[in-house]
Image (cartoon, rainbow, N blue to C red):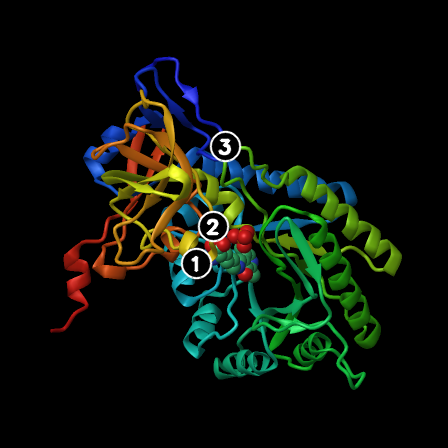
Amino acid sequence: MTGGPDTPLGLPWPAHAARGADGAVRVAGVDVRDLAAEQGTPAYVLDEADFRDRARTLRAAFEGAFAEVGAGVDVYYAGKAFLSVAVARWAHEEGLRVDTSTGGELAVALRAGVPGGDIGLHGNNKSGAEIARALDAGVGRLIVDSLGEVERVAAAVRARGAGAPPAPVMVRVTTGVHAGGHEYISTAHEDQKFGLSVATPADGGDSPALTALQLVLRHPELRLLGIHSHIGSQILDPAGFAVAAQTVLGLRADLAERTGYLVPEVDLGGGFGIAYLPGEVPLDVDRIAKEIAGAVDATCAALGTPLPRLSFEPGRAIVGPTTLTLYTVGTVKPVSLDEGTSRLYVSVDGGMSDNIRPALYGAHYHAAIVSREGAAEMVLARVVGKHCESGDIVVHEVQLPADVAAGDLLAVAATGAYGRSMASNYNHVPRPPVVAVRDGASRVLVRRETEDDLLALDLG
Ligand code: LLP
């Protein structure tokens, strides 16, 4: 570390990213120029202390808020956002459990030494092998997503023989609440693949959710742990969580009235939004935890039911802001726009293969030159990748120094969630490494793919 008066970059950058007096950025005391020299680019650079702090802070916020109303709570780290053996271990060390959605994610969590009981398995189409593996591992919960899956999990338990313990299951329901961005909408009927609707069908019979819950109760091979609801992702308006909580708690009370069984747990999913751009305000975790705890408490009081144990599954809010992607600038090309204006197209050595989110969702990111301070005025730029399509955009619009040039290091902020985990090998581009930085030292968590890795799959 240079020891100079480094200036923290602030959000949306990792907590320990700061620009030194020499103009170059350090992340957790590691100079990005050294990282680029040692690891090459592109590379995902993950601030380990930021990850741990976010995990711990989130857990403490929910524990504190629910302790006030007298309920227990568990926080699961949603591995789909980004999972590696080290990251699963960090989450667990910080007191979180791990949420997985495939056999592959489950394998990573198990390799990290996370006990099966601290792992949940999701998935709307789990294979027989995934269910068997989850049962072998003794997962703490299987979240079932359809009536057919209730039967399949029960059959898998039976196949394990007479002494096999019942599988702990939650039923994933859809509450009609969809959130994401600045709004939420609430609709009665759902037209999507996840979960079982709580809406009463046209014939006035039981909702699919109530039917599934009762079906679970009729199976001695299954232990009904609770009800699960996930309303969306990148949510910045907290209102949807309280509405979903009310619906789920109402369903829990209906089931108890019908069957005498009050499910002990309710999971309200993940989805807490983060800042991607300067000035964007992330969801305030303390506030949201208090609001949800208040809504749960009030709803249970109104229903006359004791409080359940709660759980949450944040992914993005823990890992998203911790990571930047480091690229090297290649071609720089001004392109004329209407009315005499122009835009600088800045090509970097990655693109839609390491971050599909701009192309897939129109997601916006922020970027900066990090190997030096720009001396020139700032100009409107678009950061693009090296792939063979015009939609290969990394950052739609950003101000960069007019003298940006080949060889400069450019970083894109807040790429920790759904970056590496959704990366591809489009155009046979090997996927970048994930490098953790902490206290002035770096460590490769996931190594860079090589052309040999890719060719090893090609049988000629
Ligand atoms: N729990 C369940 C059941 C989920 O389906 C998800 C995300 C999460 C938890 C974690 O949500 P988070 O806290 O990370 O928002 N690829 C998209 C996001 C897909 C989210 C899918 N489910 C993106 O890049 O924006």
Residue extending farthest to the bottom is: 203
Q: How many marks?
A: 3
Q: Quadrant of residue 203?
A: bottom right
Q: Looking at the picture, how far across and down is residue 103, in whole percent?
A: 41, 67
Q: Position of residue 43 (x, y in %)?
A: 29, 42
Q: Is residue 43 left or right of residue 167?
A: left
Of marks 3 and 1, which one's residue comes earlier in the chain?
3
C-alpha gap between disc 3 and disc 2: 17 Å
Q: Position of residue 201 (x, y in %)?
A: 75, 81
Numbered mark located on residue 11 in the image:
3
- Residue 402 x/y as whole percent: 32, 29
> Would residue 217 appear left or right of 37 to someone viewing this image?
right
* Mark 3 burial class by Cα count in 10 Å: few <14, some 14-19, many 20+: many
Asked if the residue at tag 2 contacts the one at tag 1, i.e. Cβ–Cβ closer than 8 Å, the answer is yes
Tell me: residue 361, above or below residue 379: below
SS label for mark 2: loop
